[in-house]
Image (cartoon, coloured by chain):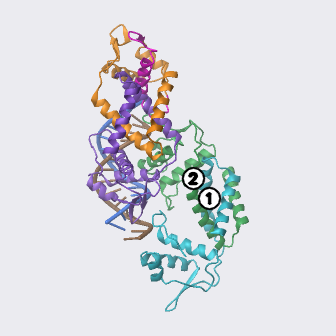
Chain colours: A green, B cyan, C orange, D purple, E brown, F blue
Amino acid sequence: MISIDSRSSKPIYEQIIDGMKENIMKKILRPNDKIPSVRELASIITANPNTVSRAYKELESQGLIVSIKGKGTYIADDYTQDVDYRKVKQIKGQIKNIIIDMHHMGIDKSEFIEIIKEVYLEIDKG
Amino acid sequence: MISIDSRSSKPIYEQIIDGMKENIMKKILRPNDKIPSVRELASIITANPNTVSRAYKELESQGLIVSIKGKGTYIADDYTQDVDYRKVKQIKGQIKNIIIDMHHMGIDKSEFIEIIKEVYLEIDKG
Amino acid sequence: MISIDSRSSKPIYEQIIDGMKENIMKKILRPNDKIPSVRELASIITANPNTVSRAYKELESQGLIVSIKGKGTYIADDYTQDVDYRKVKQIKGQIKNIIIDMHHMGIDKSEFIEIIKEVYLEIDKG
Amino acid sequence: MISIDSRSSKPIYEQIIDGMKENIMKKILRPNDKIPSVRELASIITANPNTVSRAYKELESQGLIVSIKGKGTYIADDYTQDVDYRKVKQIKGQIKNIIIDMHHMGIDKSEFIEIIKEVYLEIDKG
DNA sequence: GTGGTCTAGACCACA
DNA sequence: GTGGTCTAGACCACT
């Protein structure tokens, strides 16, 4: 369900967050679904429960999942967040750097938008 | 020439790299232009020379600038890099995460592409 | 009579306590009314009897309900508690935190008092 | 600057968060002020650095402070957040319970609003 | 058994 | 020295 690359520089807890979000977007996980307990997932991906807990807490603070003491953790009912303009601004900065890198490899605007569309297709397929 | 936000979470050496690349893309810096020495730039942006040095080393290893002992540092002649498929793949991963975050805020494909176009406009203007 | 949100972060026994208090405040439950037994209520709201029992014990220790062995559980005769200054002080602490959070969202004193009044209306209506 | 009650049931990291927010609201801490490093504050309040770190991370994700690796942590420039309707709704639930508790102690609407005003005065004075 | 909190101690990236 | 990440292990509240 979630694949972890322990050799990646991306922190494990972020990989869990991203993996979970991807599963939700692809509707592999749907509202009210139960997800693995902190300890279960930790043992599946051979990570420390605290690491999984941190990811779950972050997902909960973003309103994507709901944790209930003594019962378990569930996908939230309404997982559509409001548009966070601070976040959009930050993402625009990321995109700017990507565009500049692409430019230095000779990839222009239309080619870049093609790449974006490819990624959308990959998400839909995967 | 290069603006540093010391309160950003992005490391200063990366900000220098990105700023330099942006200047090259905007043709503010052209091939064979002389750029400030490590110490000069460090004093201009009030950073540690070690930090500037790290940025220059990175830029040189990417072939964007050339250091000539006893003369100074220059923008490389041919600064168009080859398409590095490993890098493209890594960027696709970044884009995937951005798309998923956007999706959770209710921003779909066409709106996202609009945002990309906005960023292109901002780069051209800026 | 009492609605339980099993996906809330608030413990179920607290939801039972709060629900019971709300019913008393709204005069849906009046002094000497008989309330469901622990097992009955547990089956109604599909909770563990231990959980309901804990809530009843708490309510009884606060003097809001009375259990009579072999007969059942009843709303207490005089359910008006004395003003507990320790509790008022603790609630003031809660309010302080709420005020600070509101302030950071740009909600000032008069707007906050409006919100309080809204809640009073909702309780009267509900 | 921040007082911790280790005997309180409120987690230490929340006490740090609330204390910091209070200091910001009272303008004891102003934008761009440097706050104690994770290790410093941990030693001042005799808590574990991880605990302080968790509080700082939460404050950063709320946009109140900015952490810079290798430099330190600072009060954010613009600490006014948008109105978060999910949070307002959650707070309304808290207020509802407070109102019900107050009612059971014979404290009615106008008296309750008086208490709110008292808290505002205490914050301004303190 | 489930999540929540806390401590202790380690290693890394950055300035 | 500063923050960021991770592990290991402990205790508590809730079901």
Give x and y (percent) for residue D59.
42, 51
Q: Say left or right for B83 vs A7.
A: right
Q: Which residue type does callout 1 highlight?
A: Ile
- The image's mark for residue A66 is none
- The residue carrying mark 2 is A85
Q: Give the quarter of the image for residue C100.
A: top left
- The residue carrying mark 1 is B95
Tell me where the magenta segment starts and ends, as one range.
C5-34
Q: Is residue A12 visible?
A: yes
Q: Is residue B125 magenta?
A: no
Q: Residue furthest top?
A: C71
Q: Say left or right for B62 vs A69.
A: right
Give x and y (percent) for residue B46.
43, 75
Q: Give the quarter of the image for residue C78.
A: top left
Query: Which chain is indicated by disc 1?
Result: B
Q: Is residue D15 above or below residue B82?
A: above
Query: Which chain is indicated by disc 2?
Result: A
Give x and y (percent) for residue B25.
64, 74
Which of C114 and A15 lies nearest the eye of the viewer? C114
Q: Is residue A35 visible?
A: no
Going 45% across and 78% down the picture, which residue do you hit? B42
Q: Which residue type does callout 2 highlight?
A: Tyr
Q: CA distance from mark 2 to mark 1?
A: 18 Å
Going 39% across and 49% down the picture, which residue do you hit? D25
Q: Residues within 10 Å of mark 1 (few under 14, many from 20)?
A: many
Q: Is residue C23 magenta?
A: yes
Find numbered disc 2 in the image and state the secondary structure of the residue it sits on. helix
Q: Disc 2 vs disc 1: which is toward the camera?
A: 2
Which of A74 and C104 lies nearest the eye of the viewer? C104
Q: Is residue E8 above or below residue B56?
A: above
Find numbered disc 1 in the image and state the secondary structure of the residue it sits on. helix
Q: Residues within 10 Å of mark 2 (few under 14, many from 20)?
A: few
